[in-house]
Image: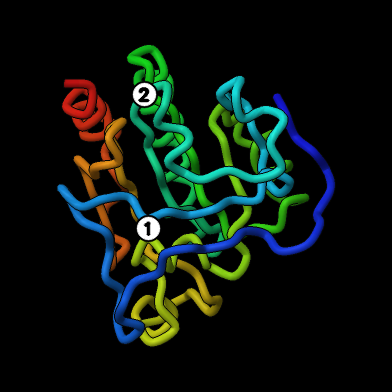
């Protein structure tokens, strides 16, 4: 596991943002993954492609050189829903990694807490810090004009909506799941099916 316990500078840089800031507008199936730059210093990298291991930053689409990418949001403020979400992602990861796909979870936690989350839940996939929701905003699942706390009782923090995307090697999104009502965590079976589609 590669984890650099050092937090320097900005967490990430976004080079592409949604055109509308009024409501969440998730990237959709058949759309292209936005160009998003990530600071590698604030992530726990357990399955990082060799060609990215020495980089201090990279773009999300850099993961796609080796196969499809499952991209998902997470926040501990989601409480039980969040725990269920992580469990389902863990089940999905054990299947999709055998197919040649990778997974990256975007977390609202501080990096030091991400390290504990990985250990506490025995997670084996990559997680990166997104404290200010900039990555989630670029994916269209966070907007200050449509806050989760205004929709879901019990959440008082600025967090993204639960979302999972599967991206093919040519940067096309082949699966999108956004649960704005926090009713059903993403299905690991659906993720696996989407990865198989992305491999075609």
| Residue at mark 2 to residue at mark 1: CA–CA distance | 23 Å
Residue 123 vs 21, above or below: the answer is: above
Tell me the quadrant of the picture where the C terminus can be found. Answer: top left
Please identify the residue farthest to the top as the structure is shown.
Answer: 98
Q: Residue at x 62, y 26 (%)?
A: 46
Tell me the quadrant of the picture where the N terminus can be found. Answer: top right
- Expressed as whole percent of the image width and height from the top left, the position of residue 59 reads 51, 45
Say left or right for 17 vs 177: right
Say left or right for 142 vs 135: left
Q: Residue at x 30, y 41 (%)?
A: 171
Which quarter of the figure has residue 193?
top left
Image mark for residue 25: none
- Expressed as whole percent of the image width and height from the top left, the position of residue 179 reads 27, 60
Total label count?
Answer: 2
Residue 45 vs 95, above or below: the answer is: below
Residue 59 vs 75, above or below: the answer is: above
Around disc 1, counting alpha carbons within 10 Å, would you say few (fewer than 14), some (14 to 19), or many (20 or more)? many
Image mark for residue 162: 1
Say left or right for 97 vs 2: left
Q: Nearer the viewer, mark 2 or mark 1?
A: 2
| Mark 1 secondary-structure assignment | loop
Residue 157 vs 189, above or below: the answer is: below
Q: Residue at x 58, y 31 (%)?
A: 123
- Expressed as whole percent of the image width and height from the top left, the position of residue 134 reads 52, 67
Q: Tell which circle, 2 or 1, labels the residue nearer the N-terminal end.
A: 2
Residue under numbered circle 2: 67
Q: 80 or 112: which is nearer to us? A: 112
Around disc 2, counting alpha carbons within 10 Å, would you say few (fewer than 14), some (14 to 19), or many (20 or more)? some
Q: 71 or 53: which is nearer to us? A: 53
Q: Residue at x 71, y 49 (%)?
A: 42
- Expressed as whole percent of the image width and height from the top left, the position of residue 145 reads 38, 87
């Amino acid at each position: 596991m590669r984890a650099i316990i050092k937090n320097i500078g900005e967490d990430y840089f976004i080079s592409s943002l949604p055109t509308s800031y009024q409501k969440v507008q998730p990237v959709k199936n058949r759309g292209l993954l936005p160009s998003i730059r990530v600071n590698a210093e604030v992530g726990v990298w357990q399955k990082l492609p060799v060609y990215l291991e020495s980089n201090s930053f990279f773009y999300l689409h850099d993961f796609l050189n080796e196969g499809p990418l499952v991209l998902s949001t997470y926040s501990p403020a989601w409480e039980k829903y969040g725990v269920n979400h992580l469990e389902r992602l863990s089940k999905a990861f054990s299947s999709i990694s055998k197919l040649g796909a990778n997974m990256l979870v975007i977390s609202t936690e501080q990096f030091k807490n991400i390290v504990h989350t990985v250990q506490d839940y025995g997670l084996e996939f990559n997680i990166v810090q997104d404290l200010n929701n900039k990555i989630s905003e670029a994916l269209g699942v966070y907007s200050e004009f449509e806050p989760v706390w205004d929709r879901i009782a019990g959440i008082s923090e600025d967090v993204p909506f639960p979302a999972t995307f599967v991206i093919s090697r040519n940067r096309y999104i082949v699966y999108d799941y956004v649960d704005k009502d926090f009713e059903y965590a993403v299905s690991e079976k659906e993720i696996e099916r989407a990865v198989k589609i992305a491999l075609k």
